[in-house]
Amino acid sequence: MRHITTHTTPATGLRSVGDTSWHPRGACYGMDPEEADELFFPRPRDLCAIAEARSLCGRCPVRRDCLNHALENGIKEGTWGGLTKAERRPWHDGLPQRMDYSRVVAFFNGRDVHLTGRERQAVIDHAYVRGWRPARLAVALQISPQHARDLLRQVANKVFDRDRYQGIPRKKRKKAPAQPTTDKPPAGGKSAAGRPVSRPLQTKASDAPLGKAA
C-alpha cells in the first residue's frame, strides 16, 4: 500500500511530498520560532538576516531536502536551502520540466515520491509498454479509471504516429496453418497440371501366384 513518510521513518534518498523526516537533522532545528521567522523570513532589505540565514544553511546537512521541500510544495516566501525568494523563482518555474529517472524507478517500486509533469508522463509511457491495464494505472496515479484509459490511449496513438512517421511496419497477425490436402487424385485420372496419375496395379485373387498358405 502506498504511504506518506512520517517523522519516524528513516531518511532515504527519495522523499514524498509529505516527507518531513529530514527536519530533525536540519541546522535550524530547535530554534525559537520567533527567531527563526526573523532569520528566514526577513524584511525585503534586511541583508544582515539574509546573510546570516545563508551562513547557517551553508553548513546544514539537509540543505538540498529543504530546497526541494520548498519547491515541491510551492513555498515561495522566505529562505529555503540557502536561497531567497528571488533566487528560487527560476527553480519554481522550471520544476515541471525536471526529469529524474530515479524517481520514476522508485514509483514503480511502490514508493510515494513526488513526480513532476515530465516524470509523470514517463511513468505513463512505461506503464503502456509494460501492458498495464487502466485500472492499475488509476490506482497507482490516484486518478479515475476513465482518465487512466484516456492517458494510455494517448500513448498508444503517439506510438502509432511515431512508427508511421519513421516507416516502421506494424506487426502482422500470424495466419492460420493451411489444412493438409488429401492424396486423392481428381476425377478423370489426371492431376491439376493435366498429367496422368499413376495408380498401383491391383491383382485379382485368381491371378495370385500359388504358394504356401500363411
Image (spheres, rainbow, N blue to C red):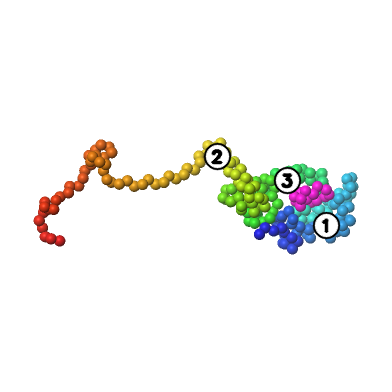
Q: Which of pointers 3 and 2 lies earlier in the amino acid sequence? A: 3
Residue 163, numbered label: 2
Q: Secondary structure at mark 3?
A: helix
Q: Position of residue 17 (x, y in %)?
A: 73, 53
Q: CA distance from mark 2 to mark 1?
A: 54 Å
Quick check: 90 above or below 12?
above
- Tag in front: 3 or 2: 2
State the residue position of label 3: 95
Query: Which residue lies at the image location 67% right of the left edge and 45% below the top edge?
Result: 118
Compare residues 188 and 120 and report the one nearer the observer. Answer: 188
Q: Position of residue 191 (x, y in %)?
A: 26, 40
Q: Secondary structure at mark 1?
A: loop
Query: Which residue lies at the image location 86% right of the left edge and 59% below the top edge?
Result: 31
Q: Which of pointers 3 and 1 lies earlier in the amino acid sequence? A: 1
> Where is residue 8, by image quadrant?
bottom right
* Residue 143 in sight from this viewpoint: yes
In the image: residue 194, left or right of residue 48: left
* Residue 102 in sight from this viewpoint: no
Compare residues 195 and 169 and report the one nearer the observer. Answer: 195
- Label count reads 3
Which amino acid lies under the numbered mark 2 shown in the image of this protein? Asp
In the image: residue 107, left or right of residue 208: right
Which residues are drawn in magenta?
Answer: 67-82
- Tag in front: 3 or 1: 3
Q: CA distance from mark 3 to mark 1?
A: 25 Å
